[in-house]
Image (cartoon, rainbow, N blue to C red):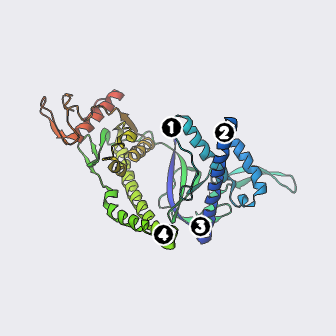
């Protein structure tokens, strides 16, 4: 079975290349905003939408009139309409999506939808002879393993780990003052992989990030809480400066770097934990939580977002799939209340952290009891029995 994976590497363009990339992002953003307004006006007038094909044809005509549209490769320009079309399809599925004009800070990436090269039959303009030749796409790797982009040149990329699989497309992303290349790779899943343990249940929380059904506890690193004091001071300092001034821009960059640091720490922690679980267990069972509803509790919302439950489950899902395992969601009803020993329902408030069953006498940590129930529920769905 083939799966898609993303590999993210830092790239180091020179000053001239950075200015070019910034200008390309501005052009793509302008095209996105223009297409969005065209779609909205067309719908108000005709009660029907503009298709992606119609927008692409209009862009082709605009290139003859607007010279700066020719300074950027065609693929990132065309991909702008894919993004707009995707958001439209998402809203049609019943998910509430607000399509709005994108500001400079909102549009930070451009995608080359083809990568590398292929052999094609090319007709000579002078002789008319047709020959089979190697054709290079707008984005590829050169002989020095640098990222070669049409109209930009070669850019050094720090390949800190090997690319496994066939590269299908590449996205160039601006993150603060740094640039990254994200390669979308197609590779085969190792379906014959062996796992040390058959299954585990995972109960996520705030005090402890996760508790497994075997009693293993993963502490919550609380990255935002650790940096909150520094972040609050930086934001307060920014608010006292004149917006748009040189000092305001410098302080804004410091605030951005703090947010990026916290996000990177959280992402690193979640990647490592999800990878370890996907390599150890064939079946991983988690609660099917509706996080959107849980964060409506204003007392817990910041802690839940800081923990990153949703990102963790997303990472765990694709990592399990790529390693030959499976992530299965279990209904969360009464996993904390029911006794894992005798299945008696023991009512307890959120402040009670220990499960004590008077029927069978079992005493467990509240989250450990829930993790065992999650694993039991998942195994019941698969008609399997616990190995231990």
Question: Quarter of the image holding residue 385?
Answer: top left
Q: Residue at x 78, y 55 (%)?
A: 64
- Label 2 Cα crowd, 10 Å radius (few <14 / some 14-19 / many 20+): few
The quarter of the picture where residue 205 lies is top left
Labels 3 & 2 near each other (Cβ < 8 A): no
Residue 151 at x, y = what percent?
68, 63
Marks 4 and 1, Cα distance to the nearest angstrom?
Answer: 39 Å
Instruction: Tell us which disc is closer to us: 3 or 1.
Output: 1
Q: Which callout, 1 or 2, points at the residue further toward the start of the chain?
A: 2
Q: Which label's residue is closer to the chain start, 3 or 1?
A: 3
Q: Earlier in the sequence, mark 4 or mark 3?
A: 3
Question: Mark 4 = which residue?
Answer: 242
User: Is 210 left or right of 351, judged from the image as shown?
Assistant: right
Q: List x then y, in percent, for residue 322.
A: 45, 43
Look at the picture and state if 359 lies above or below 131. above
Q: Name the residue nearer the viewer: 160 or 51.
A: 51
| Label of residue 44 in the image | 2
| Neighbourhood count class around disc 3 (C-alpha, 10 Å): few under 14, some 14–19, many 20 upward | some
Q: Circle 3 is placed at which residue position? A: 18
Image quadrant for the C terminus?
top left
């Amino acid at each position: 079975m083939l799966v898609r994976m993303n590999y993210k590497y830092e790239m180091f363009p020179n000053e001239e290349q950075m200015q070019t990339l910034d200008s390309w992002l501005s052009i793509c953003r302008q095209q996105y905003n223009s297409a969005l307004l065209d779609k909205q006006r067309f719908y108000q007038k005709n009660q029907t939408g503009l298709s992606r094909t119609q927008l692409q044809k209009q862009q082709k005509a605009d290139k003859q009139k607007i010279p700066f549209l020719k300074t950027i490769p065609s693929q990132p320009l065309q991909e702008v309409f894919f993004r707009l079309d995707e958001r439209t399809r998402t809203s049609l599925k019943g998910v509430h999506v607000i399509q709005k004009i994108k500001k400079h800070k909102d549009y930070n990436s451009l995608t080359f939808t083809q990568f590398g090269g292929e052999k094609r039959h090319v007709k000579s303009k002078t002789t008319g002879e047709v020959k089979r030749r190697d054709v290079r796409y707008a984005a590829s790797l050169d002989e020095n393993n640098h990222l070669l982009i049409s109209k930009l040149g070669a850019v050094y990329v720090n390949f800190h780990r090997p690319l496994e699989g066939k590269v299908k497309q590449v996205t160039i992303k601006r993150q603060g003052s740094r640039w990254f290349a994200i390669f979308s790779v197609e590779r085969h899943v190792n379906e014959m992989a062996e796992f040390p343990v058959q299954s585990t249940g995972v109960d996520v929380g705030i005090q402890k990030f996760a508790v497994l059904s075997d009693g293993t506890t993963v502490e919550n690193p609380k990255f935002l809480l650790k940096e909150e004091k520094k972040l609050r001071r930086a934001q307060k300092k920014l608010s006292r400066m004149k917006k748009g001034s040189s000092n305001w821009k410098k302080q804004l960059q410091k605030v951005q770097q703090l947010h990026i640091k916290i996000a990177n720490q959280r992402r690193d922690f979640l990647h490592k934990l999800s990878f370890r679980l996907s390599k150890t267990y064939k079946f991983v069972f988690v609660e099917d939580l509706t996080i959107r509803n849980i964060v409506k509790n204003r007392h817990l919302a910041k802690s839940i977002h800081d923990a990153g439950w949703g990102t963790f489950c997303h990472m765990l899902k694709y990592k399990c799939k790529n390693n030959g395992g499976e992530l299965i969601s279990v209904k969360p009803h009464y996993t904390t209340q029911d006794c894992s020993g005798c299945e008696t329902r023991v009512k307890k408030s959120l402040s009670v952290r220990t499960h004590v069953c008077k029927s069978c006498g079992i005493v467990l940590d509240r989250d450990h009891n829930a993790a065992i129930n999650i694993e039991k529920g998942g195994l019941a769905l698969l008609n399997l029995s616990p190995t231990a």
